[in-house]
Image: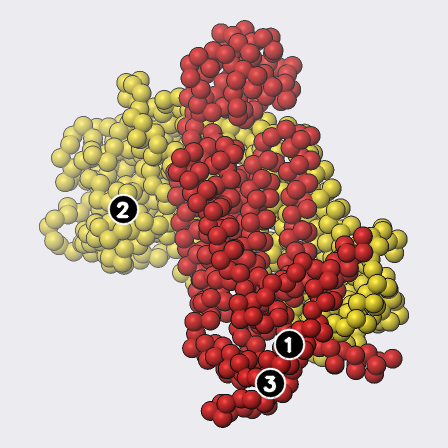
Amino acid sequence: MLGTRAIVSRIYRGEISADIVGRPKLWYSISGVLLVLSIAGLLFQGLNFGVEFKGGSVFTFSAPSASIEQVRGAVTSGGAHQAIVQKAGGDWRVTTESLSSAKVTEVKQSVAGELKVPAEKVSTQVVGASWGGEVSAKAWQALLVFMVLIIAYLSVAFEWRMALAAVVALIHDLVITAGVYAWSGFEVTPATLLGFLTILGYSLYDAVVVFDMIKEVTKPLGPTSKITYSEAANQALSSTLVRSLNTSLVAILPVAAILFIGTTLFGAGTLKDLSLALFVGMIVGTYSSICVATPLLVQLKEREPRYRELRANIARRESSAKRQAKIAKTQVAVAPERDGGTDDPAEPEDGRPGGGEASGDRTEEGIPASVTVRKVVQQGPRQQPKRGTRQQRRGK
Amino acid sequence: MAPPRSNVPNPGRTLLALFVVMAALTGVMFMQGHPTPKLGLDLAGGTTVTLTAKTANGRTPPSTQMDQAVKIMTQRVNGLGVSDAEVAKQGSSNIVVNVPGAGQDRVVQLIGTTAKLQFRQVYAVADGKPSGAASPSPSPTPTAKNEKPGGASPSPSSSPSPTGSETPRSRALSEALAAPTPTPTGSGSAPASPSPAPTGLPPGLGTMPPGAAGQDYSGIDDKAVIKQFEQLNCYVPDKRVQGSNDPNRKWVVACDQKEERGQVAKYILGPTRVLGEQVSDASAMPPDPQQGQSSWWVSLKFKSQGGREFGAATTDAYRAYQQDSGSPRSQIAIVLDGQVVSAPSISRGAITGGTAQIDGPPESFTQTYATDLANVLKYGALPLEFTQSSIDEVSSTLGSDQLRGGMIAGAIGLVLVLLYCLLYYRGLGLVAVSSLVVAAGITYVSVVILGENMGFRLSLPHIIGLIVSIGITADSFIVYFERLRDELRAGRTLRPSVETAWKRARRTILVADAVTFLAALVLYFLAVGGVRGFAFAMGLTTLIDVIVVFFFTKPLVGLLSRTRFFGRGHPLSGLDATRLRGTANRTAKGAASSASATIRPKSQEV
């Protein structure tokens, strides 16, 4: 139990550090597989659109003593999957998906049997889509305009790379959620559509909060900083990880409750349509803002000349012999309890211990003369061994 | 109300202000008399109308025209607001319209009107009694000037309230009626008789020729029409004249749509000059006293071709006006569904700007009527004529079980959120809980008030959406709390940390909320129907989120930071600095101290 306790207390102190940025290939391949599956589902299975989008059959009959639930039960037991029940005046109006004439007869018999209505008194007609092309076309139009605006807005608020990464993550979320619908064969009703729109806002929101932190941490980076952009971004990610997980949990809890409690107790319908889309979309959205948007952003940023330069500088400093010896020492001292209790943070590509470990070291020896070194203000995380102890000593 | 900018904001005052505003809103809610939100079609039912297409010989109407009619009706319904009305084709010749809310007669009227619009030049005007016949309805005796009509005509689509004063700018029609000087047009001679000033007071209506005696029918080359005109009686409930709605007929006879000053005029109209298809946009405009308007009016914009056509028509009318200001040909009649809505005299030159306006007497041109008319005209005419074959009250589509289920499940979800916040944030969790409660309260009150004033109706997806949004709302204070704990971890004391953490969290919250709000705005203005209502709810909760975190969560944390319990970092406060910094130093010592700082997940009775 001590292991889990340690983990819990680390989470409580906001001290999860995982090297997420360092493993883009892993995340991209996971996402790639999911995307391929989703697109395949959309192409081969297709989405199962509901009555509101496609039209269907409508049954009209008079059964004064029946309740909504009874009528719905009678129609669905006749073989209809969807049944939208309304009482208009004294008559019941039940809209179902398009049924073949054989099915229509079955439904009529079922209604006649269960609700004591003579079968010839049940009239049936074809009904058109109430959420036809107009609504869908408008929704697509709105989506496109929104994409353009959001890229513009994020480009102003942050920069174009962040905008691009956020929008890629957004599309990723929507496609995967749609894929889940395609494979599961659940109906796409107006409620589902609304769920998709909520994901749209939520996914971006999540990415923006993470990017805001990254921006803040990477702002002071200059050519002489001690850490690369990737490492800084990773630190930022680690510090918002707790927040991200917390908020996702808090947002998903009500959705999960509605999905699992609502649908098991009260059957399918609007509740399921909406909450399933939200549930899938939020989980995927949380994942994508951390594991897709951020690595993508880092890859874009690392191509920038100034961050390339920074990388080169650090690599040069790394390779000096004195440095190497020092690092070896600290690694030996730190490794045992750094890695205890959490899942082992992986070594980043450049072979240095993860986290902001190296920045604790302030010597500038062994730097080639070509590089002008200015003493910069201490950057990076404040949890440094020496300072921490000193402050604690001061505090007591 | 701006967030306090001083370095030492007074949290108590901010909280107090927020509660005063909330109390005021709650008061407004109860004063409106409906302390419950309006519900949508799926939860509360509404009115359902079945419209059947009328065809000339009982054949089934072409399905393309039916689809177009569905499209136009959908646009009209959605033009009315943010409710989730449904329009669907049923069978081959029926269209079923479901409107949320009971007794939506006005909406029903509006959806079913064909709204075929034509602009034609007037060739003759007379009082709408058949010549030589006594009027079947007691027409009010013409009274002296400046006296308002005794009883406004009850019209189906608006409830006119007789306005108190007559306008200085009389309607063009009465001017035209005022001087039926039979000067033969086309001679080019200027009228000998002095014409009344265009903005004169309404002349006594006694000058109106009864029936059609002494009319000048020059230029009308269709005797049958003149005969029809002379026999026409417009003092009947159904003022639609056979054939008056056909744009292809060269000459038509039409009645005025409404009584005005106790009179209904009848017209002979020339060929159609502009068709309704040429209208690109229409909007209702409030009266502008500076222009001498006392009633609402509808502003029309034409497409380029329509603008040219209208320009040509008004040029002809203005020429007629210059020759004889009393000539009926100076008027352009605006014909809607075979009745003349208005026939303004073109007395100020041709209108070539591609716009036109429709106005009328203030007692019938109310805001509602103008808005409805604009809404109908904007989306064009229906390709078919429809009759209402049935109007019913329709029940909700979801049993009460669905709503109850959604609410119960949502409540369970929110309770889980609260428990989690309390467990993770301890004392701060209480702030989170109360913030959520305040957010939920403001949301509820806003929805009720907006339902009353904007026709916003909650359907089940909206309710689920709101519950979910409240969950997302929690994000803002989690951002703040995490920042606060970061500051404490860095070894700062609580009181200043409250401010510094807030400064950093505030930007994040605003940028992130701006994204959501942008999404809501775009969807609201571009999408239609239910999506629009949903976008509205989304924008609303985002705004409420910002309000709550600025004016409630932050001041509350500020206040609590002054208490001993939080300020001293009591272990249960969630701000226990030693625990937050438990292993700030990553040494063996730190690991040892974390053993004392283990969390035993047990329900805290705080």
Residue at the spot 56% in from the left edge and 67% down from the top edge: A348
Q: Residue B299: x percent and y percent?
A: 37, 52
Residue type, mark 1 in image? Ala
Q: Are marks 1 and 3 in contact (CB under 8 Å)?
A: no
Q: What's the CA distance linking mark 1 and mark 3?
A: 10 Å
Query: Where does label 3 land, which residue?
Result: A322
Q: Are marks 2 and 1 on the same chain?
A: no
B569 displayed left or right of B160: right
**Above or below, B421 relative to B12:** above
Q: Is B435 rendered above or below residue B389?
A: below
Q: Horizontal placement of A274 versus A1: left or right?
A: left
Task: Name the secondary structure under disc 1.
Answer: helix
Q: Which residue is mark 1?
A: A328
Res B323 → quadrant: bottom left
Q: Which of B461 and B190 lies nearest the eye of the viewer?
A: B461
Q: Secondary structure at mark 3?
A: helix
Q: Amino acid at mark 3?
A: Lys
Q: Residue furthest left?
A: B187
For the point 54% across and 75% down, which residue is it?
A228
Residue in the foreground of this view, choosing between B245 and B487: B487
Q: According to the image, label 2 marks what residue?
A: B278
Q: Chain of mark 2?
A: B
Task: Note the chain letter of the red one.
Answer: A
Disc 1: CA contacts within 10 A as few (<14), some (14-19) or many (>=20): few
Cα distance, mark 2 to mark 1?
81 Å
> Which chain letter matches label 1?
A
Separation (CA) of disc 3 from disc 2? 83 Å
